[in-house]
Amino acid sequence: MKWNIVIFLLAAGFLFACGGDDSPKRIGKSSSQSSKKQLKNDTASLDKLMEEARAAQKVPFEKEYWKLSHFIIDGKKMKASSGTLDATFKNGRLDGNSGCNRYFAAYMADTLQQSITIRGLASTKKGCQGSLAAFERRFQRMLKSAKKYEYSNNTLSIICDQGEINFLKSIK
């Protein structure tokens, strides 16, 4: 949905900038300056429209601090053995602690379809040991495969290929 809006706005901006006039244009200094000014105005208008479109599709769980409650993998509920797993979503950026390391990624959420895509996940490289390292790897793998989300006032569930990641709203 979001990409459809962006494509529509880009096409509208292109058509507006090009105009519908098929008559030959005189190319010269004043024409070039006028075209640059028009392009700048069109770009500003397009930026404003895109900002309004993003505002209309406000992601409900943004700007909240979320702590891991549990995973559901193969129908089995699992809790974190130790460490703090959390997430903060803000302006298309996801960051948090995955048990031992800090992680960060870009995300895009579609509020109409309740879908979410997480891309470019990376993390710090502290030397985690044993079960915490395995738990952290699984958490990050699941985030990378996020497909949908379910949100209510105090809970956020990220539905992934391997199961669910369930968060509770918290205070930092």
Image (cartoon, rainbow, N blue to C red):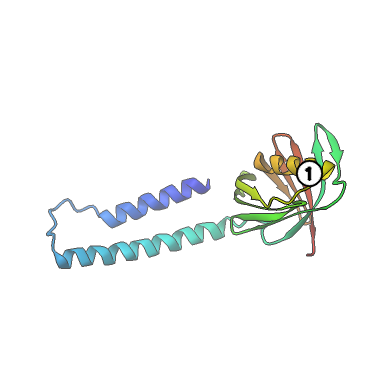
Tell me if residue 139 comes above or below residue 85 in the rendering.
above
So how many labels did they put on this image?
1
Tell me if residue 34 comes above or below residue 136 in the rendering.
below
**Mark 1 sits on what residue?**
133
- Image quadrant holding the C terminus, namely bottom right
Q: Position of residue 78 (x, y in %)?
A: 85, 40
- Mark 1 belongs to which amino acid? Ala
Q: Position of residue 68 (x, y in %)?
A: 80, 51
Q: Position of residue 28 (x, y in %)?
A: 13, 63
Q: Classify residue 11 as left or right of residue 77.
A: left
Dot 1 falls on a residue whose secondary structure is: helix
Q: Residue at x 71, y 40 (%)?
A: 142
- Residue 70 lies in what quarter of the image? top right
- Residue 58 lies in what quarter of the image? bottom right
> How crowded is the residue under tag 1: few (<14 C-alpha within 10 Å), some, or many (20+)?
some
Q: Residue at x 47, y 58 (%)?
A: 50
Q: Point out the residue furthest to the top here.
A: 74
**Residue nearest the observer in this picture, 83 or 2:** 83
Q: Classify residue 10 as left or right of residue 168.
A: left
Q: Position of residue 150 (x, y in %)?
A: 72, 46
**Residue nearest the observer in this picture, 75 or 101:** 101
Q: Point out the residue furthest to the front here.
A: 127
